[in-house]
Image: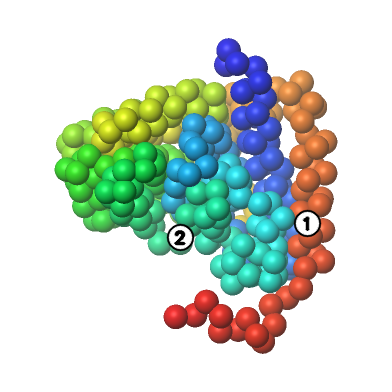
């Protein structure tokens, strides 16, 4: 990137996500984390590049692989760790866990374990924003498997028909749990989106948060000015197993070689100078956040039925 300060800022945010998840990997066997975890290692650049182009008042809606999006949008790290610990100081008082992180104060409107659910939520929010004339941009994050769900087609059609201020961001890691794209999709995703008359772009360099930021900034500008919805697909990689802290390269449905090739381009691995400049501060912040979770109280009987409708 031409702007070194911007590059460093994006690098710092991406590295923060990775080091947070590496700490989660360390903690998970100790039974301190009270929910399943779906890790975003390998996909950090997508969240950082996209969210870097947004304003705090812009809304994002995410998937169960939610740590990266929550942190990239500005969610509080201490409250995130407390939520994973099941503590009352967590973002949802310990009741939601890893898969349902939310931080409405910074525009992280929630994440869900239901595949494709972020898409209609973002479209509905965009319809409200258009009627209120707020200038707000709404973003749906989802994996490529979400486009196999019927609600995604309904949402694309509705957003296009009404020229809603929404950007659909597809994180293409090529896998739905253990199933590769080739055994799931007979259609071309870009052609599908274009059929709904939504301009679509694809980025192959999913490790390049600078490129993602620059392209997303242009899309945000167009959508904010009333051009209607946009679709951005980014080829990325899921470094860990579908759910949990381990690796799964020995399971036979993918291979380590693809991951190792990816790592040769990953700035969080290759850019040792910037890593050395920012890592210590990040690790200190993670230590503080984990200590906060450790020291926080468990929910009591008085919280048992709160927030239940």
**Colour convention of the picture:** rainbow
| Residue positioned 68% across, 32% down in the render | 12
- Is there a contact, CB below 8 Å, between mark 1 and mark 2? no
Image height of 267 relative to 70, above or below: above
Is residue 3 found left or right of 178 in the rendered image? right
Image height of 41 relative to 201, above or below: below
Q: Position of residue 69 (x, y in %)?
A: 54, 46
Query: Which quarter of the rendered picture does the C terminus lie within?
Result: bottom left
Q: Tag 1, which secondary structure?
A: helix
Residue 72 lies in what quarter of the image? top right
| Residue positioned 61% across, 50% down in the render | 75
| Residue positioned 31% across, 48% down in the render | 132
Query: Which quarter of the rendered picture does the N terminus lie within?
Result: top right
Image height of 250 relative to 32, above or below: above
Q: Position of residue 199 (x, y in %)?
A: 26, 30
Count neighbours of disc 2 (C-alpha within 10 A) and say few if under 14, some if 14 to 19, many if 20 or more. Answer: many
Q: Is residue 249 among what the camera can see?
A: no
- Circle 2 residue: 112
| Residue positioned 54% across, 57% down in the render | 102
Is residue 124 found left or right of 53 in the rendered image? left
Q: Is residue 207 among what the camera can see?
A: yes
Q: Position of residue 20 (x, y in %)?
A: 70, 47
Q: Position of residue 225 (x, y in %)?
A: 32, 30
Q: Tag 2, which secondary structure?
A: strand
Q: For this rendering, which residue is in front, 276 or 304?
A: 304
- Circle 1 residue: 290
Q: Residue furthest bottom?
A: 301
């Amino acid at each position: 990137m031409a702007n070194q300060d911007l590059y460093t800022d994006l690098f710092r945010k991406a590295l923060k996500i990775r080091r947070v998840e590496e700490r989660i990997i360390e903690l998970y066997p100790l039974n301190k984390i009270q929910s399943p975890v779906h890790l975003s290692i390998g996909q950090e650049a997508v969240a950082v590049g996209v969210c870097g182009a947004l304003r705090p008042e812009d809304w994002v809606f995410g998937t169960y692989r939610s740590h990266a999006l929550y942190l990239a949008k500005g969610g509080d790290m201490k409250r995130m760790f407390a939520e994973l610990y099941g503590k009352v100081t967590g973002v949802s008082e310990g009741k939601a866990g890893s898969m349902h992180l939310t931080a409405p104060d910074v525009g992280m409107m929630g994440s869900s374990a239901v595949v494709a659910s972020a898409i209609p939520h973002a479209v509905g929010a965009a319809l409200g924003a258009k009627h209120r004339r707020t200038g707000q941009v709404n973003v749906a994050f989802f994996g490529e498997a979400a486009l196999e769900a019927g609600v995604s087609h309904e949402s694309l059609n509705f957003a296009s028909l009404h020229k809603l201020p929404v950007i659909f961001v597809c994180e293409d890691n090529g896998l739905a749990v253990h199933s590769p794209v080739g055994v799931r999709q007979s259609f071309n995703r870009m052609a599908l989106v274009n059929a709904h008359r939504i301009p679509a772009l694809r980025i192959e360099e999913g490790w390049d948060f600078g490129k993602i930021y620059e392209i997303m900034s242009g899309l945000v500008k167009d959508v904010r000015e009333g051009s209607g919805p946009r679709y951005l697909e980014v080829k990325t990689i899921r470094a860990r197993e579908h759910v949990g802290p381990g690796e799964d390269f020995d399971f036979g449905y993918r291979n380590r070689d693809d991951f190792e090739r990816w790592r040769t381009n990953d700035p969080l691995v290759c850019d040792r100078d910037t890593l050395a400049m920012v890592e210590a501060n990040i690790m200190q912040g993670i230590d503080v956040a984990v200590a906060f979770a450790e020291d926080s109280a468990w929910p009591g009987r008085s919280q048992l039925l709160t927030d239940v409708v």
